Image (cartoon, coloured by chain):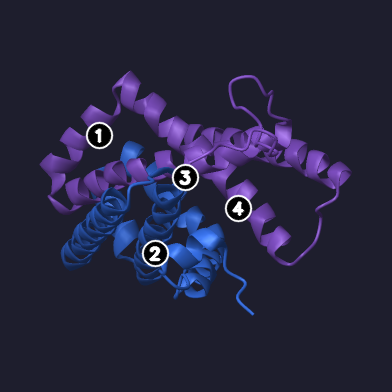
Amino acid sequence: MAIHTNRPTSPHLQVYRLPLTGIISITHRMTGMMLSAGLILFVYIVSALAGGGVAYDNMQTLMSHWLLKLIGWGFIYALFFHLCHGVRHLIWDTGHSFDADTLNRYAIIELAASLVLTLMTFVWGYYGL
Amino acid sequence: MDYRTPLARAKGLGSAKSGTGHWWMQRVTAVALVPLSFWLIKFLGLSLTAPYQQTVDWLASPVNTICIIAWIIAVFYHAALGLQVVIEDYVAAEGVKIISIWAANLAFLFLAMTALLAVFRVVSIG
């Protein structure tokens, strides 16, 4: 089949610098997949709780490993990022806020909001629930 | 008048059928998950720091049980719908695509049932 080279093409990912809105868009998808994988950890934690006191204590010991703590906080940040950008998808679904200025302003707002929410969770967890 | 592309006509696969329902349920579960995420954060915070009995008591109290169950149902549904879209976008081969979507759906169904069983077991303890 002949290839028509004069057709318009989509931006080439390796040479095209994505704007902030584009980076956030693909990050939404990546955090969604990471959160899906993280659900396995939730199932493990709740199953350990159902398994009794010993299983629960073993789970807490395992989860206090620095690598799993890092994954845990990564999960919390991904959750808030996905939540904040998800809310914007819901706003878009009502047909509003598609102009360039609003897109960029909301991008900054949701990045800041997801960081603040993660920090709040950290403080909340650190000083007692 | 046929609005389909020539490629779509050649393949003869027709419409996407239940696409609207898929899209709609993605939104419904998303809206539900916004407030329900609070219970997940609270549950994770307790599970990773609090003594055993405290976490059991918290999860066994009715409002928390209901909210965690609602979160489990909504989140696994939302994840299955989302992963299906990602697979459909990036996997071109038809056979691999369908098997991947089945595998993802079955995995999420299995995980959701495991989580629900665990919650019921905790409620029967507490």
Image coordinates of residue B46 in percent, x first then y, are 37, 45
Image coordinates of residue A22 in percent, x first then y, are 67, 36
Rendered colour, chain B: blue
User: Mark 2 highlights which residue?
Assistant: B64
Q: As shown in the figure, which amino acid type bears the numbered disc 2?
A: Asn
Q: Which mark's residue is nearer the viewer, 1 or 4?
A: 4
User: Mark 4 highlights which residue?
Assistant: A86
SS class of the residue under badge 1? helix
Q: Are marks 1 and 2 on the same chain?
A: no
Numbered disc 4: what chain? Answer: A
**Mark 3 and 1 residues: CB-CB less than 8 Å, in contact?**
no
Q: On the picture, is B9 further left or further right than B77?
A: right
Is any part of residue A90 visible from this angle?
yes
Instruction: Tell me which label, 4 or 3, sits earlier in the chain.
Output: 3
Numbered disc 3: what chain? Answer: A
Numbered tag placed on residue A32 in the rendering: 3
Rendered colour, chain A: purple
Q: As shown in the figure, which amino acid type bears the numbered disc 4?
A: Gly
Instruction: Tell me which label, 3 or 1, sits earlier in the chain.
Output: 3
Vertical arrangement, residue B31 with respect to residue A18, above or below = below
Image coordinates of residue A112 in percent, x first then y, are 71, 35
Numbered tag placed on residue A60 in the rendering: 1
